[in-house]
Image (cartoon, helix red, strand yellow):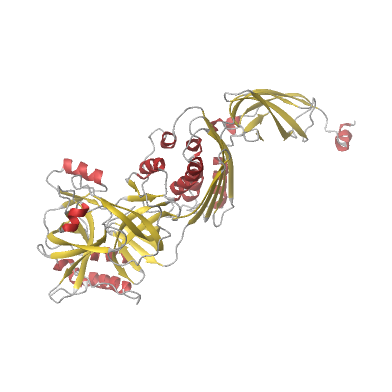
Amino acid sequence: MPTTTPSTAIASARRVALAAAGLAALATSPALAADPVMPLADVRPGMTATAYTVVQGTQIVSFPLTILDVTRAGDGPGSSLIVVRAEGPLMQQTGGIAQGMSGSPVYITGADGVRRVIGALAYGQGDEANVVGGVTPIEQMIANTVGTRQLERTRAVGRPVRIARSADDAARLRRAHPGDRVFAPLMRWSAAGLDPRLVRVLRRRLGAGVQVDASGPGALRPPVTLEPGASLSAQVIQGPVALGAIGTVTYVDGDTVLGFGHPFLGAGPEKLIMADAHITTVVAAPIKGQSYKLGVGGRAHGMIVGDRRDGVVGRSGPVEGVTVIADAYDTARGTRSHMESLVAPQPELVPVSTDLLQIEPVLRVRDGSGRGTLTVRYTIETPGMPTVHYRNVYAAEGDVTGVAGGRLGSIVGILTDNPARVMVPRKVTIDEVLRPGVLAATIVSARTTTRTVRPGKRAVLALTVRMWRGPGRRILIPFRVPAGVGRGVTRARITPYDPTGFDSSAADLVAALEGDGTSAPLRISPAGPPTDRAGAPERRVVRIIRRSMDDRHDAVRLLLPGEDAEAGDGRQLGTDGVVIFGGRATLTLRVGGTGTQKARRARRP
């Protein structure tokens, strides 16, 4: 008769102690007792089992399974896989095993009437009926929580299987190894409240499929108890926009929640928002082997803290995240958008998330995208760092949103990925104003409004520009004459401060954000040790950020003789919201005396 401890699956006394300690650690909380466990050594082909999942709403349903094989999916310890065949009318309804069922707990009831969990339905084989799947043994999932993989090699070894990273990888492996069983994770990214064009960009950035649920974000729905069989979401963004992956809860013990049965991002230690989920329906695609749940993440319950080969580990309790507040205003339509979101503090995902939350409000106020001028302001607050303030103006004949996209993410990326240490922002504030006209111009000429200027004193630059597809315009710019300029005539140069803020083409949003196609999809890997060197790492990061922010588009650069714009020389002179993207002019400075009593005394013999 099966026992309720995994000790029979451990080869040595040391392994027995480690596994027992792991189960004991999970059983300390009186909040919810863990289900009894059936050791892998007691699982045999031919046994019947029952799996639990959600296919609509939040109601947990079941379907029967038959154990086909107990085999291996790798060479190391803890690489076992239970091969099963799903049966029953529910499989006909769902088109077989669906993406989103990953983590569905599988139970076998013994002769003593006790129902014991054997693992999580985690993989699909993509067979013609789409009913053959792979179950990750529960012992391997529990081992994730205590950091040990000291599990016995499977005693009953059947035909080996291969585990692919995705359905596309699985198709390639099947072609290369036609005699092998190839399984792919039953996982799919889910998004809600996001413009469909951004979903296309997101698929490229993540290197994965993203399904949009039209029912809207579920964070305001009533919370659902995270129990075995309930839907589980690893959330990257919560709020008016929702983004994450939907799976199923496998095992709960106190405040510890295990799910998925396969890696999500494979980051090891992780910080994602653990939430419940609401399932709209299951889209059946049995021939392709890609049936999937359509749903959206719901209320937060805590944090996903581990993401390893055999599943994710969550902890119920406080929720951490980056608060992102985004406001956009369209002056032509008089429309406003206000969005308050919470972003999971996983360093690699924060730049992608903040980029999405910068673009989405503008698309909402415009009800689409198109030509115009966009002024953006970002405030980034990070513990232990000075607050970062960034302002810029973008203009485009095609789609101004695409031109402005990516800047916020690049600044946040410097904080989360730099030679000093990982710095995850606490709060990001976004303010955007969209104007219908294309306020872009080239420089025609420049002069001062007075014949003579004085070193160190204020003067006014009269800049003549040619507006994009429009007439000439005169812009008056107050500035301070450099103190080191000598008396006499000096010829300075006026050039665009940064000419990249204007796009004259009619490229659409997606093309602009996707770029030239050379950027690789996001790949998450465990973070290494910090690489702090002697000195003040925060100051170095501040310098990097300041250099990256030196790209103001509604400004010109005043260069004295011998100064070079590429070397960062010159003085920044704002042009009151007009993007300067071309042209240059020579400015004649007639420099007189300082006019001060001190200067006159200094010239006396």
Point out the image quarter for the N terminus.
bottom left
Point out the image quarter for the C terminus.
top right
Residue at figure coordinates x 63%, y 31% from the top left? 556
Residue 409 left/right relative to 226: right
Residue 288 left/right relative to 45: right
Placement of 183 over or under 463, stated as above or below: below
Q: Is residue 515 visible?
A: yes
Placement of 497 over or under 253, stated as above or below: above
Residue 103 left/right relative to 269: left
Q: Residue furthest left?
A: 46
- Quarter location, residue 56: bottom left
- Quarter location, residue 61: bottom left
In front of the other: 170 or 114: 114
Residue at figure coordinates x 67%, y 30% from the top left? 558
In front of the other: 265 or 18: 265
The picture places residue 281, in percent across and down from the top left corner, at 29, 54
Placement of 56 over or under 491, stated as above or below: below
The picture places residue 58, in percent across and down from the top left corner, at 31, 62
The picture places residue 146, in percent across and down from the top left corner, at 32, 66
The picture places residue 363, in percent across and down from the top left corner, at 48, 42
- Quarter location, residue 239: bottom left
Placement of 488 over or under 337, stated as above or below: above
Q: Is residue 73 visible?
A: no
In front of the other: 22 or 519: 519
Residue at figure coordinates x 48%, y 27% from the top left? 505
